[in-house]
Amino acid sequence: MRYLALAAAFLLMLSLPSPAHAGVGLPKLATVVLDGYEVRILNDSPDLQTGRNTLTVEVNGLPEDHQVKITLAGPAGEQITVPLQKVRVLAGIEGGHGDDGHGTGDESGNGGHGEPSAKKDDHAAPSSGGHDDGDEHANGEASYIARGRVVIKSTGTWKITVSILDDHGDGLSNEAEVTAVQGGPNRIVVGVSGFLMGGTFLYGFVKRRIDGSVRR
Amino acid sequence: MSAEPRLRIEEPKTIDDSNNLLDTPWIKAFLRSGWFPAILAYPTLVVFGYIVYALLWGPLAASANLGTGLTWVVWWPLIPIFMFAMGRLWCAICPFATVIDAVQKFAGLGRPVPAFLKKYGIWIIDAVFILITWADHVFGIVESPRGSGYLLLGLVTAVVVTGIIIERRAWCRFLCFLGGLSGNYSRSSTVELRATPEICATCKTQSCYKGDGTTPGCPVFEFPRTMQAMNNCNLCANCIKTCPNDSIQLNLRPPTKELWFIARPKFEEAFLAVVIVGIVLVQNVTMVEFWQPVMSLMTQALFGSKTLAFTVLFLIAMAIPIAMVAAAARVSGKATGEAFAQNFARFGYAVIPLDLAGHIGHNMFHLLAEGKSIFFNLAGLFGYHVTGSPAVVSPGMLQILQFAVLGLGIGGSIFTAYKIANRNRTGESAFRAFWPHLLVIAIFGLLNIYLFLQPMAHRV
């Protein structure tokens, strides 16, 4: 019984620092309304993270000859233009959940299959809905989907400037603010794991040489 | 009512070596060469390293994280199929095993396996398996790349620590929860490794267990000469390499055959098999419509704590299959004069084919309805942005495949229970032992069919 309790405690210890970002689909970073168009900016993490971020931009009903341009302005004066490339939407078998940019999500921190908003598929119909509850957008409807990768180096408030440019390069801009947080894993968890592995390895390495023989 | 049980003691089965894969020269040469299993194990280790990196340092959205996709959409669904086809071969190329071998080379202390691990190993596996399933639902391990990353990191830490301290691959045999699962599934597999008794009777070296100086002995403490089950054998081929007498056979066999003739059934192994029924039940039941109202009611009743409510419902869901098999064992044992624990232990193994089918069927959805997401993410890594439906097959085809697998599992479980009942009884006595378990398997089967008809949640 003692060992079962130890196993449980060990697992719980591992699980405690784990933030539950349950749900599927890409989280929405910001929505900017511009000239009647709703520009949705999705990220591959719920916030901007230090390190690499892949931003996805979706706009419904954008004419073919229009383009979206996004620039990020960081708290330390950084200016980054997101190198957006149009996403190729492949024809595929129906019944999946469309592409990875939509679907219901859940940020309650209590996830898993048991959450009400976990995306469900009835094996037949493409699902809809955004990462935020109540958002009914679907990539299948978005006429413009583009994606670009940026590297964020500092945490804090970043300003996103969105421009929609017509075929002459003219257009309007609007802004939104997002917060960038520290990316990567919990350093304590990684540190403890590294310490345990490194420490045991060192102990074994030294002990083996002191003892001079190893039981095989 | 309590008729005298008619016992029919069976002679030990002779080994059917008519389908010995080692009779094929290139298979034998490959398994005996130093390339095996290294040629598979090291690339697996590299992929595993990338997965851990992606999970810990990559995107937090599961759908954008290649590590999540590779782990939960590809590896986890494929692993039971792999186990069914090739036993615990995965364990031979598992990155944990490779890590253990590597650290032992430089820092292994080679301490003997503690007695408590030998005694309680499977119970620890049972407990960890249940806890991981629980933690997955409460903390969202599968859907959270970081959660998955911490889980893998924790496991690697445990693997390194135990690998350095304890000899051979004690982790794989006594502690790995996946090892426990694969041990059970491998009993249904289509391959078996056996030694030839007549040859082994004259053997003086026992190098299959001890090693021959070049190749180590069995990493999971098996002695092929007396081995009658595939639940521990990793198919690492060390014994094939070290045996000086060519005694080892690698035979193809009918699926589930091993379950029909288990010489020494263990209660804890049977318990694990029944626990897996509960785990599959939990995985499916949390995705159906009525789950949310029940959760809401329970949450209200339990001080508004969702975690507490889930834990209570989880325990109930886990307890139902255990209680049902226990009830069947009670009725079956009473009718035949067999002790409860012995009956539970013998017939508990019968649900393994259903476990396997439930596991494969459930995860087939993730593999075939979400599989293409891997290619989208992989393309994204190289700067090619594509998207689309992640489904690999149509929903209709998917359901046909799921129900075909489930049907085979139900049939396999019923047939296994029938064979177990008939192992040392005949006629009416065998039927009295059989029918309570038949009923329980039928209920499990129907429950699975119902749950498979319900909408399911995607992982990525």
Image (cartoon, coloured by chain):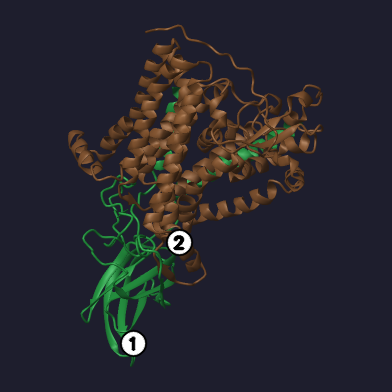
Horizontal side of B382 relative to B168 (left or right) equals left
Disc 1: which residue? A65
User: Which chain: green?
Assistant: A
The quadrant in which residue B325 appears is top left
Horizontal side of B280 relative to B86 (left or right) equals left
Residue at x 33% of width, y 61% of height:
A27
Q: Amino acid at mark 2?
A: Lys
Instruction: Name above or below for residue A187 compared with residue B168.
Output: below
User: Which chain: brown?
Assistant: B
Residue at x 19% of width, y 35% of height:
B303
**Front residue (pair B166, B88):** B88
Chain label for disc 1: A
Q: Amino acid at mark 1?
A: Asp
Q: Position of residue B262 (x, y in %)?
A: 56, 24
Q: Position of residue A200 (x, y in %)?
A: 60, 38
Horizontal side of B92 relative to B269 (left or right) equals right
Instruction: Name above or below for residue B407 compared with residue B258.
Output: below
Q: Secondary structure at mark 2?
A: loop
Q: Position of residue A44 (x, y in %)?
A: 39, 63
For the N terminus of chain A, the quadrant is top left
* Spatial separation of the CA atoms under disc 1 and disc 2: 30 Å
Q: Nearer the viewer, mark 1 or mark 2?
A: 2
Disc 2: which residue? B372
